[in-house]
Every structure is written in C-alpha cells, then in structure tokens.
Image (tube, rainbow, N blue to C red):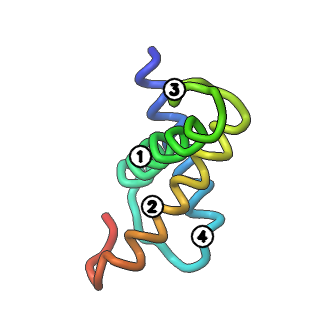
Amino acid sequence: MGILLFIVFGLVVGFLARAIMPGTQSMGLIATALLGVAGSFVGGFLVALVTQNRVTDLNTAGVIGSIVGALLLLFLVGRFGGRRAIV
C-alpha cells in the first residue's frame, strides 16, 4: 500500500508543480506522476541536507521540498530538453 500512496502523492505533487510553473507542459498522467515522484526524491534529499529529517519522512518541509524539487526538474527539462515534447 505504501508504493501506491507514494505514486498518488507524486501525482498530486506533479499536478501542483505543473500548475505553478508558467507555460504549457504537455504531459500525460504517467509523466506527471513520474515528475512528482522524482521531485519528491530531489526535494526530500534537499530538505534532508538542511534538517534532521530522513528523505522518506512525511512532514511539511518534505511536502514543500517535493513541490520545489518537481518545479526544479520541470524547469531543467524545459530549459535543456530541446524541442522534443515532454511525454
């Protein structure tokens, strides 16, 4: 059940990151979920560097860090991804 909740959490984080980031991102549900999951790992790692929390802990700093991580990944893909579409 933990993996399913992590994927759903990644989907929510991916949707929030896409809503915050200006512009149009043409991504499907799977790509959005993968963006959110990867952003959760990046954000969780950055929060773990600053605080005493583990990467997999669920807390307010981790949720905000997950969104920031997803925004960072979305920016990097948009900036360095070239002209190919995000699928």
Query: Do tag 2 and tag 1 residues touch (Cβ < 8 Å)?
Result: yes
Marks 4/1 in contact by CB < 8 Å: the verdict is no
Location of mark 2 (residue): 73
> Three-letter amino acid code at disc 2?
Leu
* Residue annotated with mark 1: 38
Nearer the camera: disc 3 or disc 1 = 3
Residue at 36% in and 48% down: 30
In three-dimensional space, the C-alpha distance between marks 3 and 4, rounded to whole angstroms, equals 25 Å
Asked if 2 appears above or below 67 in the picture, the reply is above
Tell me which numbered mark, 4 or 1, is placed earlier along the sequence: 4
Depth check: give the residue in front, 41 or 19.
41
Give residue 77's position: percent from left, percent from top.
Answer: 38, 69
Query: Quick one: label 2, few (<14), some, or many (20+) residues within 10 Å?
Result: some
Disc on the earlier residue, 2 or 4: 4
Q: Earlier in the sequence, mark 3 or mark 1?
A: 1
Judging depth in this view, the residue of 63 and 9 nearest the camera is: 63
- For marks 3 and 2, the one nearer the N-term is 3
